[in-house]
Image (cartoon, grey):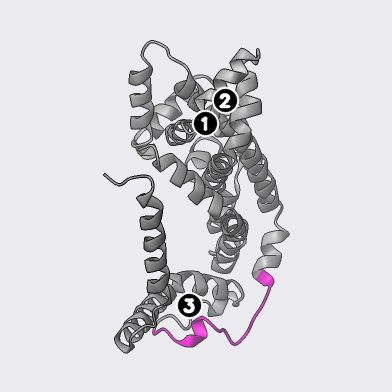
Amino acid sequence: MTTPEIQPTILARRAVTLRSRRRAPLTAGQRWGRSGLYLILLLWSLFTLMPLLWSLAASFTPQNQIFANLTPFTWRALFPEELTLDAYRTLLTNSNFLRALSNTFFLCFVNVVGGLAVNSLAGFAFTFFEFPGKRFLMALVFVSFLVPFDAIVIPLYSIVSGIGLTNSFQALILPVLASGGLVFMFRQFFHDTPRTLIEAARIDGLSWFGIYARIVLPLSVPVLISAGLFLFLAQWESYFWPLLVANRPEYQVVQVAIANFNTQYITRWDVQLAGSVFTLILPTILLAFLQRYYVASQAASGSKE
C-alpha cells in the first residue's frame, strides 16, 4: 500500500511525466497523421453541412432558379448569380406566419417555465423523499422516456379530445410539461447535493419547499439551463402534435405555418426554405452559448451512474 508520505511524490512525478509528454515535439509521421485526420473531418463537416448551406443559398435565390443548378450539381447552387430578399419579405409580412411565431414564443415560454417546475419538483421528490412504491414509480419514469412519442400519440389524442381540449393552447401545453428523461436527469443531478446541507437546513426549521427553492435550485443552474434548452427546442421544433390537436389558424405554431405555404396553387420553395433558415437562427444561438451548461449537467448526472 502506498503511504501518505510517498503518495505526493508519486503524483508529482506523474504530473511531470504528463507535462513532458504534452511538450514533446511531434514526429513527421504524427504530424502527417494529424493533418490527414483534420482534412477528413473538414471534408466530412462540409458534406454534412451541404444541405444546410444549399438551403441558405436557395432562400436568397429567385423561385424559378432554385433547382436550376442541382441536376447536375454546380457551384452556382451554393453561390447563386442573382440574390433576392423576396422570400424573406413574403415570410415576414405574412400575418399567419407572424401570428404563428408569436404563438410559438408564448408556448416556449410557458412550457419552459412550467416544465422546469414540474420536472424539477418530481426529481426533488424522488431524490430526498421516501414513500411506498418509489422504486416502481422511478422505473416507470425511466421507461417512459424510452417510449417514442409516435407510439402514444393516438391514445394521447383520444384523452385530449375526450376532455374537450382540442384547438386550445392547453392541448399544446399540458401533455408535454412532464418528461421522464428530465425527471431522471434532475434526480441524478440532485444526488450530488450534500446531505449535511439539507440536514442543517431542516434543523434550522426550513421547509422542504424552502430547501428546494433556496438551496437545491441555486446549486442546479447547469441542469436547469440544460432542461430549459431541451424544453424550448422540443416546443420550437414541434410539428406533428400541434398539427393534430390545434389545426385552427389562431393556434398554429411556426413549423405548421411554414408547411402551410404548400397549400397555395404553387409551392413556394423559396419561402419555405427562408422560413427554415429563419427558425434555425434562434436555436443555433442558444446552443452556441448554452452548450457548456448542457455538457456540465450531463457530466454531473452521469457521475452517479
Q: Is residue 78 magenta?
A: yes
Above or below, 21 against 31 in this view is above
Q: Is residue 296 magenta?
A: no
First-in-chain label (3 vs 1): 3
In this rendering, position of residue 249 left or right of residue 300: right
Nearest to viewer (mark 2 / mark 3): 2
The residue pinned by badge 1 equals 193
User: In percent of the image, x 58 and y 53: which residue is there?
Assistant: 290
Above or below, 93 against 165 in this view is below
User: In percent of the image, x 62 and y 19: which residue is there?
Assistant: 201
In-front residue for pair 127/79: 127
In this rendering, position of residue 13 left or right of residue 251: left
- From the top left corner, tell me how far across and down residue 126 is, in percent: 45, 22
In-front residue for pair 30/245: 30
Gap between marks 2 and 3, in whole Å?
A: 63 Å
Magenta residues, start to end: 72-86
- Magenta stretch: helix, strand or loop mostly: loop
The residue pinned by badge 2 equals 197
The disc placed on residue 297 is: none
- Of helix, strand and loop, which one carries label 1? loop
Three-letter amino acid code at the position of disc 3: Phe
- From the top left corner, tell me how far across and down residue 154 is, in percent: 39, 31
The residue pinned by badge 3 equals 67
Q: Is residue 167 visible?
A: no
Nearest to viewer (mark 1 / mark 2): 2
Three-letter amino acid code at the position of disc 1: Thr
Question: Pointer 1 and pointer 2: residues touching (CB < 8 Å)?
Answer: yes
Badge 2 density bin: few <14, some 14–19, many ≥20, Cα 10 Å: few
Badge 3 density bin: few <14, some 14–19, many ≥20, Cα 10 Å: some
